[in-house]
Image (cartoon, rainbow, N blue to C red):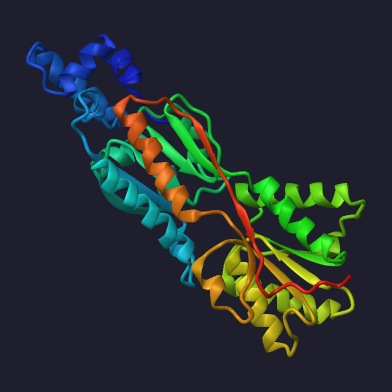
């Protein structure tokens, strides 16, 4: 749990306001008291919120984007680029400066969110790429600085989030295949500890239940959300099962779907003649696959824009933490064959 200003005050034997004034250079604190407070803060590992005074007068215009797990992706993913484009557009519109920082689970273990913001010189941050098992999922609720998470709902006095209704969207994608006669559908999952994977799988189960279809665990393929892993897992699946066991692949991301397309083609099959494929995200690359990919468009640029907009409103005191749920659309292209 991160050290707070209350902890420093208790250990120093002074009021919270005295700690704040001492660490922010107010002249009404004696030198001896100031030094004692600074020493206690250092011993406890507290990262003082030096931007608090400026935040209250709306003068601080520096925010961060913290991306977790970015370096684990070996294949270019323009989901991140689209999200960043939306974020930087909002930064221009709101007149704030953005700095980009890459983190991982280890950094989250070593440094609290407040400490990371302090070291990066930002008043608050938009954070995406979190897994449900990451340390920040349990510690962000105690943070003193505003944060907006993307794709993972977390509660806290200074924690907002921007989401898609992943459960509903994936249910629509599953229903799209079912309406076209598909019953033997291979579900290509993302990471098991990713919040979006959990929600999307729940949506698939909703669609199956509504149509009286039994979920077959043998038709589930688990990946780590990367293109290469999906390609390898789909190849193993097709080697073991063959074309008679499955008619479609319902993928939990576009990168996964592109990996599936690649493997299907390389193994001598055709899309959609032999197998139908549906993706999820709406990234630009799906326009240029062969055939172009049917996918759920989650308006990624808007997601980045809304995350920064919400963060700016929270920092300015115009809005408190809230959950923003964006709309989605199913884009029908050439990767699905109608069986009926």
> Horizontally, is 24 left or right of 230 in the view?
left
At a point 61% along the width and 54% down the height, the residue shown is 329
Quadrant of the rendered image containing residue 224: bottom right
Q: Residue 100 appears at what percent x and percent y?
A: 31, 53
Residue 290, placed above or below residue 75: below
Q: Nearer the viewer, residue 325 or 41?
A: 325
Q: Residue 137 appears at what percent x and percent y?
A: 52, 38
Quadrant of the rendered image containing residue 188: bottom right
At a point 35% along the width and 25% down the height, the residue shown is 318
Q: Residue 148 appears at what percent x and percent y?
A: 43, 38
Residue 304, placed above or below residue 250: above
Q: Residue 273 appears at what percent x and percent y?
A: 78, 82
Residue 328, placed above or below residue 82: above
Quarter of the image containing the C terminus? bottom right
> Horizontally, is 106 left or right of 245 in the view?
left
Residue 161, placed above or below residue 6: below
Quadrant of the rendered image containing residue 262: bottom right
Q: Is residue 112 visible?
A: no
At a point 77% along the width and 52% down the height, the residue shown is 204
Q: Nearer the viewer, residue 161 or 72?
A: 161
At a point 49% along the width and 52% down the height, the residue shown is 129
Q: Is residue 292 visible?
A: yes
Quarter of the image containing the N terminus? top left
> Horizontally, is 86 left or right of 169 in the view?
left
Q: Nearer the viewer, residue 24 or 156?
A: 156
């Amino acid at each position: 749990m991160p050290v707070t200003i209350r902890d420093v005050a208790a250990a120093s034997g002074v009021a919270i306001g005295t700690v704040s004034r001492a660490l922010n250079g107010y002249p009404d604190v004696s030198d001896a008291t100031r030094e004692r407070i600074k020493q206690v803060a250092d011993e406890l590992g507290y990262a003082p919120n030096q931007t608090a005074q400026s935040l209250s007068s709306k003068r601080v215009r520096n925010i961060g984007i913290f991306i977790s797990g970015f370096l684990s992706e070996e294949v270019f993913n323009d989901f991140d680029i689209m999200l960043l484009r939306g974020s930087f557009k909002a930064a221009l519109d709101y007149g704030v400066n953005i700095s980009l920082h890459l983190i991982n689970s280890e950094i989250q273990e070593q440094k609290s969110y407040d400490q990371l913001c302090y070291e990066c010189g930002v008043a608050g941050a938009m954070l995406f790429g979190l897994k449900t098992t990451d340390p920040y999922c349990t510690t962000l609720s105690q943070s003193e600085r505003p944060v907006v998470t993307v794709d993972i709902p977390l509660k806290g006095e200074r924690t907002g989030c921007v989401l898609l209704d992943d459960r509903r969207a994936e249910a629509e994608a599953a229903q799209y295949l079912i309406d076209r006669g598909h019953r033997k559908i291979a579900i290509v999952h993302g990471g098991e500890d990713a919040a979006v994977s959990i929600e999307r799988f729940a949506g698939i189960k909703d669609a199956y239940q509504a149509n009286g279809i039994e979920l077959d665990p043998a038709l589930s393929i688990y990946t780590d959300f990367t293109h290469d892993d999906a390609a390898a897992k789909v190849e193993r699946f097709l080697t073991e099962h063959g074309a008679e066991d499955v008619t479609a692949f319902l993928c939990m991301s576009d990168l996964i779907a592109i990996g599936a397309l690649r493997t299907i083609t390389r193994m001598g099959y055709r899309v959609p003649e032999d197998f139908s494929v549906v993706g999820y995200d709406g990234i630009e690359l799906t326009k240029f696959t062969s055939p172009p990919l049917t996918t759920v468009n989650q308006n990624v640029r808007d997601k980045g824009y809304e995350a920064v907009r919400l963060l700016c409103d929270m920092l300015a005191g115009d809005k408190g933490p809230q959950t923003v749920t964006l709309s989605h659309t199913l884009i029908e292209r050439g990767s699905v064959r109608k069986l009926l």
